[in-house]
Amino acid sequence: MATIHPKLSDELSQTVVSSTKSVKIKIKRSNPNVNSEQKFDDFVVPIEKWTTVLDVLLDVKSHLDHSVGVRYSCRQASCGSCGMKINGKPGLACFTKISELDSDTVTVEPMDNYPVVRDLAVNMDRMINNHKKVMPYVIREDSEIDAESGIREFLQSPENVDKYIQFSSCIKCGLCNSACPTMAMDKSFVGPQALAQAYRYIADDRDKGKNKRLKIIDESHGIWRCHFAGSCSQVCPKGVDPAMGIQLLRGYLLGIRD
Amino acid sequence: MMVLRESIIMKIHYGTAIGALFLTVIHIMMRLTQDFHESLAYENVIANYESVGYALLLELLLILISVHGFNGLRVILFEMNQGPTYEKVVTVGCLAGMAALIGYGSRTIIMTSMGMT
Amino acid sequence: MERETGAREGLKGWLHPGKIGKFGIERLAWLLMRLTGLGLLAYFIGHIYETSHILDGKAVWDKSLEMTQTTEGHLFLALVIGMCVFHTGNGIRLMIAQMGYGIGKAERPDYPYKPQSINMKGKACIYATLGMAALAMWYGMAVMFA
Ligand code: HEM
Ligand code: HEM
Ligand code: SF4
Ligand code: FES
């Protein structure tokens, strides 16, 4: 434990293991920068009722194998860092309890449809680029700060907030994009995460960028590559329901809402 | 290669689907409102083609389904692989398939309805 | 959307049966929609070719009809009927959903975050469509094998 900060190692050595239960975790290991080898490493770790998959991974990292590559930060489903495949289904490691998985063995793999950086950490550039592409900010000519009137606010009623608040819960974890069947084959597809954000801003009545965004998503690898398989919404940990946003978004392009 | 805006293509895709739905029901009802095997008898089918209304229905159905089916194929192929050349080939190929099928089917409809059998 | 920065799962993401268990009946509907669409297109091309035999006289027409008057032919036609009914029924469901109907209304999400667009109405439609396709195949076989 030479590399661990002395205070941290003190804390770790005091961990009280009162549990009688344990879980076997199978972690998919690979490091594409070095070679193409892929393998599963198994570890057995004690668990409690409240232990999450991320807790188990960190336990492995602290006590059994420091080299496991995993990205995390908030540990409370807010930062969107810890998305991975847990027993085959995309989910947040910090938001999935071992007890809810109902199995003695838990297999964790990196999310599909993203290049692996190392072990469980993936490169999310593509999602971030597509997110930026739909202009995820309020677009309008005037500003909340102007020379004549000083600082003012663009007011909005609670009803108007309700129209988009659901979609603004997105934490950019990328789980939706990893579940989407179009994403599995179409490298140019803009993806459910970005489409839901396009709807989030179009539905915001302060925003005036509707036509610009509609033009961006109405191309050959835009919104029409969605066929409502709904897998994105099945896995979204924040209730964004990207599939709903996408179907609502189509209404503008089909000319049945404005 | 973008021939039309994708939302326009999808409106066509939905429109052809709804149109074809009604015409296919009629077309299949022609088989089921009489004895199935009899409905396929040579003389019966010739008589079908020679009735102008039904021949027009077949022609319309042919066009709607060809457009819908080949666009559907294009959609699937676009989602399977990408790249400027590939997409151009797929678009041109699907348009060509569409045109060829409509041409070939129209030949049957026109010649049969004019009694050139 | 031109730069490649993404690895992809490939055809496995489309065809692997495990996906249906993981992502629900909607994922099966998605896959069947594709497969029936392609199947119908293949049948349709064959159909246009077969009906063109009407130009070659009664003997040729009767001979080409014989192809589907075998047991295998009847089963094949039953499959076409099933594909037709599923594709049509599911197509109607998709058009309605894609126009924004029956997928719920945006609201403040509350734990445990049940997605509204994936709802019982949609699932019931898919099961009903599968049921109707099965019934139509059964009816078709009853007519053809009579
Ligand atoms: C007559 C009733 C029909 C209806 C209501 C219908 C409806 C639809 C709809 C709504 C879609 C779009 C699904 C989506 O991408 O979200 C679709 C796709 C498709 N249709 Fe049809 N269709 C019909 C008949 C046909 C026929 C006869 C063929 C074959 C010639 C066909 C071939 C296809 C193909 C290949 C696709 C693409 C499949 C996919 O993207 O998943 N359809 N159909
Ligand atoms: C049980 C299945 C079917 C049978 C037995 C059948 C039979 C026939 C027959 C006998 C004809 C010649 C004209 C006539 O007498 O109506 C014909 C033509 C045609 N059918 Fe069908 N049909 C079937 C299903 C379909 C379906 C599902 C479609 C489209 C989605 C379709 C599209 C057409 C078209 C476009 C023609 C005109 C073709 C031409 O003359 O080039 N048929 N069919
Ligand atoms: S929509 Fe949901 S699943 Fe997709 S990135 Fe946002 S929070 Fe994650
Ligand atoms: S660690 Fe932040 S979302 Fe899981």
Image (cartoon, coloured by chain):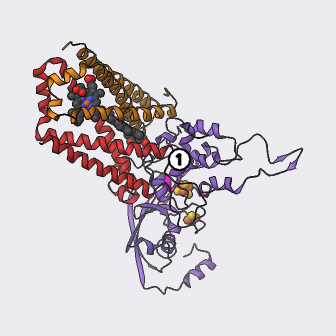
- Looking at the image, how many numbered discs can be counted on the residues? 1
Q: Disc 1 marks which amino acid?
A: Ile
Nearer-the-camera pick, B6 or C126: C126
Q: Which residue is drawn at 88% across and 47% down?
A: A149
Q: Chain letter for orange? A: B
Q: Residues within 10 Å of mark 1 (few under 14, many from 20)?
A: many
Q: Which residue is drawn at 50% across and 62% down?
A: C114
* Residue A243, x across and y down, in percent: 50, 51
Magenta run includes residue A172? yes
Q: Which residue is drawn at 28% across and 16% down?
A: B110
Nearer-the-camera pick, B55 or C30: B55
Would residue A204 be found to the left or right of residue A94 on screen? right
Element assignment for label 1: helix
Nearer-the-camera pick, A61 or A56: A56
Magenta region: which residues? Answer: A169-176
The quarter of the displayed image where residue B61 is located: top left
* Residue C144, x across and y down, in percent: 15, 40
- Ligand 3's image quarter is bottom right
Q: Chain letter for red? A: C
Nearer-the-camera pick, C1 or A69: C1
Q: Residue at x 33, y 39 (%)?
A: C37
In the picture of the structure, the residue carrying the numbered disc 1 is A246
Q: Can residue C46 be seen in this snapshot?
A: no
* Residue C89, x across and y down, in percent: 36, 44
- Color used for chain A? purple
Q: Is residue C20 above or below residue A42?
A: above
Main SS of the magenta part reads loop
Q: In which quarter of the image is the C terminus of chain C?
A: top left
Name of the residue lying farthest toward the front: B33
* Residue A171, x across and y down, in percent: 59, 58
